[in-house]
Amino acid sequence: RKSDTIFVNISMVRRTMQLDAISINASGIESVFYRPEIKLIDYEFWMNRLLLLLKVDKNYSIRMLDFDYNTVAQLEFPWKLDKFYRNAFGGIHVFAEDTVYQLYLKPDDIELLDVASKSRFANIVENCVVATDSLLVFSELVNHNKEQLYFSVDRNTNQKQVLHHIYNEIAAKYAQEYFNQIVSIYSANVPMFLNEIYNGTWDGNVNSLKIPFTRDNFELILWYEKVVSKPISAPIFESNNEIVLFDHVNDSLFRYNVCGERLAAVPISYHKQRKWNNKIISDHNGHYFAVFEKESITYLKQIDINSGEVISTTKIEKHTFPQKIKVRDGYVYYMDTDWIYPNIHKYRTQLYRQKINEQL
């Protein structure tokens, strides 16, 4: 643990700042945050607060706003920050270059609670995907990301059991064929005494294998990484005292209580429509949305978890390819980058929101 501890000097600033008035255009889209001199990197919600990850010149900061969009707290950093991350317990972390910081948040204050290396964070925190008072749910992907195991651990007895198992056998065999080709090329070009696979020192990353660089080999590895071994889509959520799992491999939605007992299995078919981008978004009120992209336009289709049917569709009206889409209290929030002077690569990033449509 000592190797994961870093002592830093952090400048904490408490102040109230009135932001520019929110602008609302004819399509009903609101600009939530925009300052031309500030780069917006990421945002996250915490209770009734909005967190912004910002860069001004070469300095980074986390700013906390209330929903009148006044600044109530700010924490400044002298090094690069990449993104926010919400853990299964609702805690907020921020990623830096090689470390992850956990934030200690209060309605009018931001402090650092803990710090860990990215590898330690991935092993301990990221694998836990759901936390209830009764159990913890962990996720494990194997077989070229075509087999996913969700298992639960009872928080009182530490008893472990399988919650749900998903296996796309055809896709796994297809991925294995590509994997075997890559390994064969490597083995044919590396002496046995230098062979990482034979010596048991290989980390499993095909990019780390010293394979002769040719166009065919490059395309083979790229296709394996970006397409063939792409993780199956089976996101899991916890809301309203239920665990909801979207098993798109088996065309079903599964609902469990907070103790891990199955309540229902519901057929789904929306994911078979063209232009679904393999994403499901949830909000803290237990609403779920499948994200579609058609001709650069993004649509959110709300899924009824009782029937599995689409009950409403929201088109993001103004911006193409919006980034970091989230839903909260009847609004879809997203970031979009507008080029001001393309010839000198001058751009601005804004945070917008748009009312969710309640009809098909």
Image: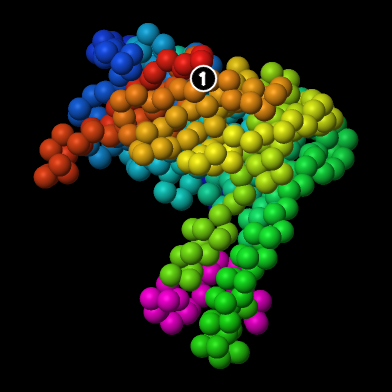
| Residue 68 x %, y % | 37, 8
Residue bearing mark 1 = 360
Instruction: Name the image quarter holding residue 323.
Output: top left
Q: Nearer the viewer, residue 236 or 172?
A: 172
Query: Crowdedness of circle 1 by 10 Å Cα count: few (<14), some, many (20+)?
Result: few
Task: Tell me which residue sits at (85%, 43%) in the image.
Answer: 161
Against 171, residue 93 (above or below) is above
Q: Is residue 120 visible?
A: no
> What scheme was used to colour the molecule?
rainbow
- Residue 359 shown left or right of residue 80 in the figure: right
Three-letter amino acid code of the residue under disc 1 = Leu
Q: Say if the magenta span includes residue 205.
A: yes
Q: Is residue 122 visible?
A: yes
Q: Say if the magenta span includes residue 347.
A: no
Task: Tell me which residue sits at (43%, 70%) in the image.
Answer: 219
Task: Tell me which residue sits at (80%, 28%) in the image.
Answer: 264
| Residue 38 x %, y % | 25, 30
Against 103, residue 71 (above or below) is above
- Residue 138 shown left or right of residue 38 in the figure: right
Callout 1 secondary element: loop
Task: Tell me which residue sits at (34%, 24%) in the image.
Answer: 317
Q: Which residues are magenta?
A: 198-218
- Residue 22 shown left or right of residue 110 in the figure: left
| Residue 337 x %, y % | 28, 34
- Residue 110 shown left or right of residue 337 in the figure: right
Against 24, residue 277 (above or below) is below
Q: Nearer the viewer, residue 10 or 187?
A: 187
Q: Nearer the viewer, residue 220 or 252?
A: 252
Q: Count of labels shown?
A: 1
